[in-house]
Amino acid sequence: MKHQIKEDNGALVVALEGDVDLKTSPDARKILLDAVTRNLPMVVDLSGVLYIDSSGVASLIEAFQKARKSGHKFVLAAVSESALRVLNLARMDKVFAICPSVAEGLAKVR
Amino acid sequence: MTTLRAASRDEAMELVAALGRDFVSTLDIERTLASALRRIADHVGAEAGSLFMLEAAGKTLRCHASVGPTDIVGLTIAADQGIAGRAVQRNIGEIVRDVSRDPQFNRSVDQKTGFTTRSILCAPLSVKDERIGAIQLINKRGGDGLFDGDDLNLLAVLASSAALAILNARMAAKLVEQERVRRELELAAEIQRSLLPEAEADDFPVHGINRPARTVSGDFFDFFPLADGRICFALGDVSGKGMNAALLMAKAASLFRCLGKTIHQPGRLLAQINAEIAETATLGMFITMVVGIYDPRTGIPRFSNAGHEPLQLYAPDGSFTEFQAEMPPVGVVVGEPEQSFPEIAVPLGGGALYAFTDGVTEGYLETGKELGLAGLKEFLARNASEAVPRRLLRVAEALTQSQTSLRDDVTLLAVDDRAAAAQRASRPAPAPPAFDPSPVTVLRLHVPAVADRLRLIRTAVGEASRLVGCSEHVARDVTLAVDEACQNIIRHAYKDLPEGEIVVEIVRESGKLIIFLKDFAPTIDPKTVRPRNLEDIRPGGLGTHLIREIMDEVAFLEPPLAGGNVLRLGKRIA
């Protein structure tokens, strides 16, 4: 799994790429939680995620809840088809705000 | 009345008529009582008067109206106490010309109020044997202040007409109350009818009919189509009749509507409804219930039956097959919502599946005979060529022809495969599945139980799934399910110790993909492996939910003697 973090005009874009599974989700969790502590509205770009399992979804939930607690917006954007399928199966598509593109995600959090 | 003086008699008749009118038009009996007493006291010429009515199941007399210098409204005495008590008990009027000579006279009121009672006239308020109370008049105005026989006759006439008027007014009030309750029941029934599904076109496979024995019903049926063309259906019968049954019916029907939209396995759906109802149901109330899902493309309904009458499958050759309940009624046993009730799947082959409540088989025909199961079957077979709604209507009509009202709610549901079977036959048959006489092992993989190897397992399982003919979507889902199951082994069975091993075995067996996952960790109790409650949004614990969501079958097999665990996952190849 790879990741990128960009600051875009007062918002943070965190992109995860590759497989987010039992092996890599501890890293994903750390990346997401660290990003939340920067106290900026956040867009998580999932366009490059080829595979995500329940541990990956759990990391997203944890970061989402932490962001919400500190009062910052948190959206998922450009979710890849395979990641969206897992979010649907886990019924998390109703929990997260999901935007079709990073640009729309940024517009939403600002 | 013959002893009344003529002039006084005419006046008395006028007063009787006036009293009757007052009570008929009153909305406030108490006020009308007070004005009636005042008019009677004036008419007879008494200084004071009181009107007592029996209360507390006839044990006490309470003063409802009084005229004169002392207001004693509210005064309550034992029903056999005082002059009034005596009049009520004997149900005849009397004059006590001089109270000082009557030991029954209750002096306490005079002592409290300073009023001096000399003479009392008292008549019971009664209609035949129905005693209501008594009217008492005190001290005749003018002269010696004593009443005479004419006064008593006059009071007796007025009292008996007042009694009749009071009784009428009470009955009218009761009717108003009954009417209010009836109207509320009508409203409840209307809401209940709105819980039943709307009738579909004649060629829709699922139809139902409900005829309540009373205004509201303890029975229900429901059905709704899913986006993929399958149809969910349910029929239930709440123990008991009346309002309490109707309320529980509303709850069960709502649970089915709501949960049925997301849970498409009848056994799991019924188990969840059971868990909900058992948690909150009133003691002693339960529901016999059938829940199912019918696929018109295959002609196969899958259903689960909790304590309900056996379902009847009518085959086009005229024969019937019965399917008994395999679980107790809903609400009887506290259950786990994640549990699944046993399911039955049976091809209808152009026939029809019937579910019905016992109100149908125990209903009376016009002849006075009970319809019975044999009678119902005969009815359904005889009308088999009719459209489904008409077939059901015929049965309901036969049961409502009888002179006696319905014994119990009548509810029937039919899943009819005839139209769908004809459509299946007209469509070119899909290529027959490859001859598949015996299970074929597609893959056997021994891997260390570590997170590092999950990717390898995913690749292998994905390829194997595609190989046996799964679509890309199904292959991806199955891969996720196996990955999650392996994670459970790594984290919970081996508890992240690195020496463990997982054996993944993939078998193709009669159109299904079967995956066995073996480990060699200490044997675990399958009951502790449960999907989490999705309402509870929190990280972790999602894996088991995903496995159950994706796979058609999830079961732990009997653990091998040598120890370890075997999980069997099954998925229809599609």
Image (cartoon, rainbow, N blue to C red):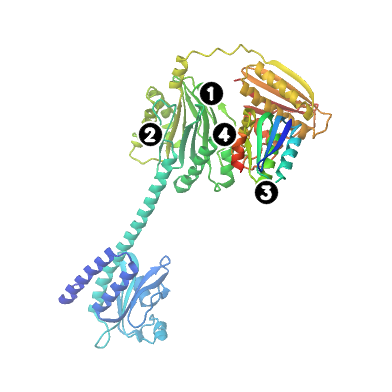
Q: Which residue is mark 1?
A: B346
- The image quadrant that residue B500 belongs to is top right
The numbered dot on residue A70 is 3
Q: Residues within 10 Å of mark 4 (few under 14, many from 20)?
A: some
> Looking at the image, is mark 2 or mark 3 nearer the viewer?
3
Q: Are marks 1 and 4 in contact (CB under 8 Å)?
A: no
Considering only order in the chain, which callout, 4 or 1, is on the residue closer to the N terminus?
4
Residue sitting farthest toward the left: B6
- For the residue marked with disc 4, what is the amino acid? Ile
Give the amino acid type for the residue marked by disc 2 in the picture. Ala
Question: What secondary structure is found at the residue carrying circle 1?
Answer: loop
Q: Residue furthest top?
A: B435
Name the residue that disc number 4 marks: B263
Q: CA distance from mark 3 to mark 4?
A: 35 Å
Depth check: give the residue in front, B439 or B230. Answer: B230
Q: Nearer the viewer, mark 2 or mark 4?
A: 4
